[in-house]
Image (spheres, grey):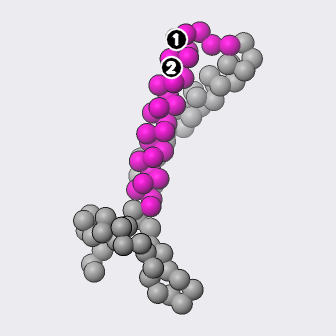
Amino acid sequence: MAGEIPEKLIKRINELAKKKKTVGLTQEELDEQKSLRETYLALFRKTFRSNVELLRVFDKNGKEVTPEKVRKIQRERNLRDD
């Protein structure tokens, strides 16, 4: 999976979320939490987009029905021969 999200990042986000619910966060920790969440979302979007762009869809009869927009992106990246 391209752009996999580091476990360390997720762990720190969860630590801050738990602390926020129990004792609260300092302004520095709130800023860190915001920054970490933005990083997480950017990595998530990158990974999701990559997965969608690699996707090939087939109907129950085995005919490919991948949307043309995705096929075009795949052709531009030399992932398709057609």
* Whether label 2 touches label 1, CB < 8 Å: yes
- Above or below, 16 against 61 in this view is above
Residue 48 is left or right of residue 81, and the answer is right
Q: Where, by quadrant of the figure, is residue 81 drawn?
A: bottom left
Could you give the CA–CA distance between mark 2 and mark 1, rounded to whole angstroms?
A: 6 Å
Q: Where, by quadrant of the figure, is residue 24 drawn?
A: top right
Residue drawn at (54%, 90%), measured in percent from left and top?
Answer: 61
Residue drawn at (45%, 79%), measured in percent from left and top?
Answer: 65
Q: Which amino acid does label 1 sit on?
A: Glu
Q: Which amino acid does label 2 sit on?
A: Glu
Q: Where is residue 39 in the image (x, y as percent from the top left)?
A: 45, 33
Secondary-structure class at tag 2: helix
Q: Residue 70 carries which label?
A: none
Residue drawn at (37%, 67%), measured in percent from left and top?
Answer: 70
Secondary-structure class at tag 1: helix
- Above or below, 44 against 49 in this view is above
Q: Position of residue 29 (x, y in %)?
A: 55, 15
Q: Where is residue 8 in the image (x, y as percent from the top left)?
A: 53, 32
- Please tell me which residue lies in front, 77 or 73: 73
- Above or below, 29 against 49 in this view is above
Q: Main secondary structure of the magenta part?
A: helix
Residue 81 is left or right of residue 56, and the answer is left
Q: Which mark is residue 28?
A: 1
The verdict on residue 41 being magenta is yes
Residue behind mark 2: 32
Residue 71 is left or right of residue 21, and the answer is left
Badge 1 crowding class, 10 Å Cα cut-off, few under 14, some 14 to 19, many 20 or more, is few
Quadrant location of the C terminus in the rendered image: bottom left
Q: Is residue 82 visible?
A: yes
**Span shown in magenta:** 24-52
